[in-house]
């Protein structure tokens, strides 16, 4: 099982999203703690409890629990799993409602639960994602479901909902997926690369590496730089950490010490080029008079005049300059990638990704359920394996 947890204050939007699916016949209510299942009645009951903690903003959880397509679960079993999840999470005296959705090729359960209980006490959200993950692992064993390895043990980090939304919107792969596929293909396409060959192969694909190298030559970590984005190996998954990479390639500390140091220099240089931008007008040094070593009066006046002009609204040329600056930055970023890493379609990357069939945007019917919630950027969210 995997779960998406969203903590927020837009209970009405989350409730309406699920009830609309029920009205369309693609979802059903499995269980609830309310008097009747109607939007008006439920919101009224929620408000009666909410007034006990009027200053609490993010007062409810909207959790989606997803089961593998191979799991054939009855409504009774899914309901019991939902109740066990609430019980183990500490929601013993709290308002809740469960929905089963039928709009995907895999069973999934949505749970809305109030963090404020009937006595006005608030369930702590400390380490909530870690607790949720442990509960899922325990429930898998209890109900003999397909077991999923924990996120800490995952060879590849799970795709987040934000990444999925971005891929669906742009029809292009995220940088994280691209890195995972390109790095894994580099290692898999050769028997056992030397450290220098590994570095060169990635650089040809536009991936620069920054090693955490001590003065003794000992390497304790690895970071990847790709098209202006910098990500550590741990963020990609255990397979991309230096502890795993060094056992996959032919690496010797003393022999490869110089090659790693040179790779670091190249990476820092590429990052410096990417970050280079035109200095702010007010930070430009004033030209010095060659004769006196002091700022000349004429130069000083001209510089002040230019700075004053730049600070004035420029409705006619401002957009043009902004576009030129953006295009210049884009060109610099594109130059960092070789032709080998271009032209990779989203479908091609997903086909090469171990979770491709699950993360393909067209198979994500629930990506839009945040559309009705206000101020979505303020909500705490995380993908939980």
Image: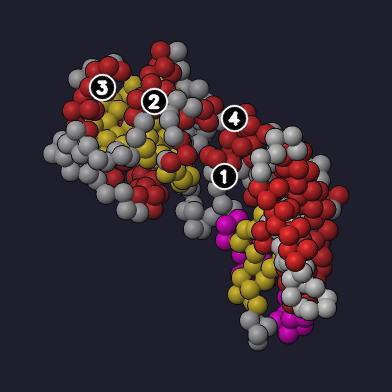
Q: CA distance from mark 1 to mark 4?
A: 14 Å
Q: Residue at x 57, y 61 (%)?
A: 234
Q: Is residue 166 left or right of residue 115?
A: right
Question: Who is closer to the viewer here, 383 or 107?
Answer: 383
Task: Work out whether 18 lies above or below 185.
Answer: above
Q: Which residue is mark 2?
A: 13
The earlier-in-sequence mark between 2 and 3 is: 2
Crowd tier of the residue under label 4, counting other residues whose Cα lies within 10 Å: few below 14, some 14–19, many 20 or above: some
Q: Is residue 358 left or right of residue 289?
A: left
Q: Residue at x 63, y 73 (%)?
A: 212
Question: Who is closer to the viewer here, 28 or 4?
Answer: 4
Q: Which residue is mark 1?
A: 159
Image position, residue 78 (x, y; %): 36, 31
Residue 267 visible within the image = no
Q: Which residue is mark 4?
A: 363
In front: label 2 or label 3: 2
Whether label 1 touches label 4, CB < 8 Å: no
State the quadrant of the N terminus: top left
């Amino acid at each position: 099982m995997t779960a998406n947890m969203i903590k927020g204050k837009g209970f009405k939007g989350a409730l309406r999203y699920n009830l609309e699916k029920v009205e369309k016949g693609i979802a059903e209510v499995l269980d609830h703690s309310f008097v009747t299942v109607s939007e008006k009645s439920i919101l009224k009951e929620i408000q009666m409890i909410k007034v006990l903690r009027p200053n609490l903003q993010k007062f409810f959880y909207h959790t989606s629990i997803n089961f593998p397509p191979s799991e054939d679960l009855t409504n009774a079993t899914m309901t019991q799993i939902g109740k066990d999840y609430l019980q183990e999470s500490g929601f013993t005296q709290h308002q809740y409602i469960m929905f089963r959705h039928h709009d995907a090729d895999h069973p999934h359960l949505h749970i809305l639960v109030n963090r404020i209980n009937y006595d006005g006490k608030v369930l702590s959200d400390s380490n909530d994602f870690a607790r949720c993950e442990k509960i899922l692992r325990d429930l898998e064993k209890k109900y003999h479901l397909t077991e999923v390895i924990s996120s800490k043990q995952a060879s590849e980090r799970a795709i987040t909902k934000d990444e999925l939304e971005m891929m669906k919107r742009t029809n292009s792969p995220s940088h994280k997926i691209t890195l995972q596929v390109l790095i894994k293909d580099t290692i898999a396409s050769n028997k056992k690369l030397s450290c220098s060959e590994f570095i060169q192969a990635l650089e040809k694909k536009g991936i620069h590496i920054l090693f955490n190298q001590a003065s003794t030559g000992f390497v304790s970590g690895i970071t990847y730089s790709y098209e202006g984005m910098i990500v550590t190996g741990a963020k990609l998954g255990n397979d991309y950490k230096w502890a795993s990479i060094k056992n996959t390639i032919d690496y010797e500390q003393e022999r490869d010490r110089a090659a790693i140091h040179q790779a670091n220099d190249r990476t820092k240089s590429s990052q410096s080029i990417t970050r280079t931008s035109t200095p702010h007008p007010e930070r430009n040094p004033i030209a010095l008079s060659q004769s006196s070593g002091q700022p000349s009066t004429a130069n000083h006046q001209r510089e002040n005049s230019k700075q004053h002009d730049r600070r004035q609204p420029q409705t006619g040329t401002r957009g043009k300059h902004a576009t030129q600056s953006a295009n210049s930055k884009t060109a610099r970023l594109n130059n960092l990638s070789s032709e080998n890493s271009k032209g990779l379609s989203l479908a091609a990357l997903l086909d090469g990704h171990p979770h491709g069939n699950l993360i393909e945007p067209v198979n994500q019917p629930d990506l839009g359920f945040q559309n009705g919630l206000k101020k979505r950027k303020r909500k705490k969210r995380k993908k939980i394996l």
